[in-house]
Amino acid sequence: MNLYNIKHPEERVNFAQAVRQGLGKDQGLFFPEVIPQLADIDALLDLPLVERSQKILGAIIGDEIPTAKLNAMVKNAFTFPAPLAKVNENIYALELFHGPTLAFKDFGGRFMAQALATVRGDGKITILTATSGDTGAAVAHAFYGLENINVVILYPKGKISPLQEKLFCTLGGNIRTVAVHSDFDACQALVKQAFDDEELRRTIGLNSANSINISRLLAQICYYFEAVAQLPKEKRKDLVVSVPSGNFGNLTAGLIAKTLGLPIKRFIASTNANDTVPRYLADGKWEPKATIATLSNAMDVSRPNNWPRVEELFKRNGWNLKDLASVSLTDAQTEAALKAEYAEGYLCEPHGAIAYQALKNQLQPSETGIFLCTAHPAKFKESVERILNIELPLPQALDKHNKLPLLSDEMEADFATLRAYLLK
Ligand SMILES: *Cc1c(COP(=O)(O)O)cnc(C)c1O
């Protein structure tokens, strides 16, 4: 598999290099040179998740990784299901939260850990990543205990849910967590600065594990196929998928699935009040504002760093960005959506509720809609209980961590401080 840097197309790497490096020159994103058309999608859809995903990823990655090796990576990563729940006649929920950290980021995080362990070579590796909540947990759990890989995770202090924090800041071992006195965009900017520091990068073998790493995106393609595979055959036409979006990695993966031949008619980019993309699609102006804290905090991103990949896909496929629907919801609208959904008999959480409502707003009578449920309702226990006036039991995975002490360090959003910390 060959990839190029979107900012500097002359920079070319193979899959192993893209996984190890994360980002290209000038913080450019790597993008596959070729996205193959998959033959016989229907036969593919008849296969079980792991077997189908092995075939899909094998077709994309090619012979760079021996088939047996790749198959083992997929099998080790995808150890949990992604069920499709029927909400009403035309609307289905794809539940992506049945992994160890109860969020969809387990798919990408676990596959990336497998990929990196496979292509790593001999040097030292430090994973540095910024999280708005769930990436951190997925990355920490995916890499926990892997030999000779150190993990440092930055997150905005006080801006993620206490439960989210407990899930990844209590592990210790090869996982260090840092509460930064600022917002997610500042954390992300620090990570980017670290990657620009050539010397630092070499000394500690810096690697990012957030959604800019191509291996995470590739893994996420697979659950779009799993969604369609679970739909009754007569519902597979005129399919609309609503994706709750923050950094837009999830949507990028969906668009790649469509490029591979998965029959999805159109996508809806669903956001909270951090609406850089919906405003851009409406007026053509890219004008990020200061990030606003919302109920759907994993989507509190005003400079979505996967956006160049979305544009690249549209350009290469000759698609029109006008066909990408987008919706932005306020917190009040999110609460109303969560209630409406609950009244329909489906318990959700704020991120999934935004995607659900965006779908409801947009879906035509002839269409079938799927919205992505990116986190388990109990991960947002405080808001869900308050909004729905119910009590939610804590799933075992969360309960166990909730009882442990926090091990995080704290830091100002200052690169020199971070640099010294990484070299320590
Ligand atoms: C990360 C996250 C999102 C946003 O996904 P992107 O790929 O960054 O757009 C949505 N919901 C939840 C629960 C998340 O953790």
Image (cartoon, rainbow, N blue to C red):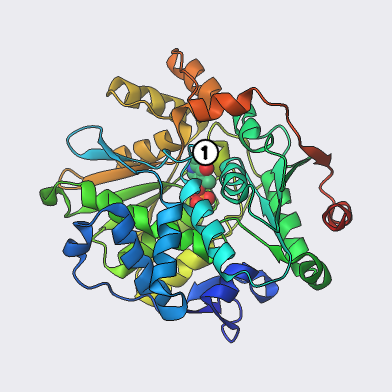
Secondary structure of residue under mark 1 = loop
Q: Does the rendering let one see residue 218?
A: yes
Relative placement, left or right, of 65 versus 237 is right
Say which of 301 and 414 sits in front.
Answer: 414
Q: Quadrant of residue 334?
A: top left
Q: Report the amino acid beneath label 1.
A: Thr
Q: Does the rendering let one see residue 33?
A: no
- Percent of width and height locating residue 106: 49, 47
In the rendered image, the vertical position of residue 293 relative to residue 310, given as above or below: above
Residue underneath mark 1: 101
Relative placement, left or right, of 412 versus 211 is right
In the rendered image, the vertical position of residue 334 relative to residue 205, given as above or below: above
| Residue furthest to the bottom | 10
Relative placement, left or right, of 325 versus 188 is left
Mark 1 burial class by Cα count in 10 Å: few <14, some 14-19, many 20+: many
Residue lying at 38% horizontally and 75% vertically, measured from the top left: 35
- Percent of width and height locating residue 148: 70, 59
- Percent of width and height locating residue 277: 50, 54
- Percent of width and height locating residue 349: 45, 30
In the rendered image, the vertical position of residue 182 relative to residue 146, given as above or below: above
Residue lying at 69% horizontally and 73% vertically, measured from the top left: 26
Say which of 318 and 152 sits in front.
Answer: 152
Q: Is mark 1 within 8 Å of ligand 1?
A: no
Relative placement, left or right, of 274 versus 89 is right
Q: Quadrant of residue 6?
A: bottom right
